[in-house]
Image (spheres, rainbow, N blue to C red):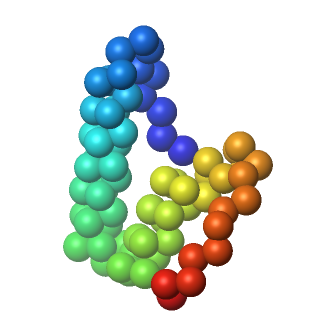
């Protein structure tokens, strides 16, 4: 899970989240380009980092996604 340590300034939460997602995307794209992982693996890694960790940490139950 990503954390920006932004404190008391709402804009820093936004920028921290934006830059965290950008950096994760760059790292995963490079790993795909280097043939270290597949696109499917990169998607699974991104979902695990950006969604699943938070759900586990906060013991949240996600809504069922019927789009797939």
**Residue 34 visible somewhere in the drawing:** no
Looking at this rendering, what residue extends furthest in the bottom direction? 68
Residue 14 screen position, x and y as percent: 32, 33
Name the residue: 29% across, 24% down.
11
- Kindly identify the residue that appears in the image at 23 percent across and 73 percent down: 33
58 w.r.t. 55: above or below: above
Please report the residue visible at 57 percent of the width from the left and 76 percent of the height from the top. Answer: 65
From the image, which quarter does the N terminus lie in? Answer: top right
Quarter of the image holding residue 8?
Answer: top left
| Residue 57 picture quarter | top right
Q: Position of residue 24 (x, y in %)?
A: 34, 52
Res. 26 in view? yes
Residue furthest top as drawn: 8
Res. 61 image quadrant = bottom right
- The image position of residue 56, as x and y in percent, is 71, 52
The residue at the far right in this view is 59
Q: Position of residue 21 (x, y in %)?
A: 33, 49
In the rendered picture of this protein, how many numbered marks are placed on residues?
0
Front-lying residue, 42 or 67? 67
Query: Left or right: 37 with respect to 68?
Result: left
In the image, 63 versus 6, the foreground residue is 63
Q: Is residue 7 above or below residue 34?
A: above
């Amino acid at each position: 899970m990503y954390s920006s340590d932004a404190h008391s300034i709402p804009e820093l939460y936004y920028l921290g989240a934006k830059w965290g997602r950008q950096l994760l995307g760059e790292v995963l794209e490079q790993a795909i380009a280097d043939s270290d992982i597949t696109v499917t693996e990169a998607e699974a890694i991104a979902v695990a980092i950006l969604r699943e960790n938070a759900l586990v940490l906060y013991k949240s139950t996600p809504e069922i996604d019927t789009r797939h």
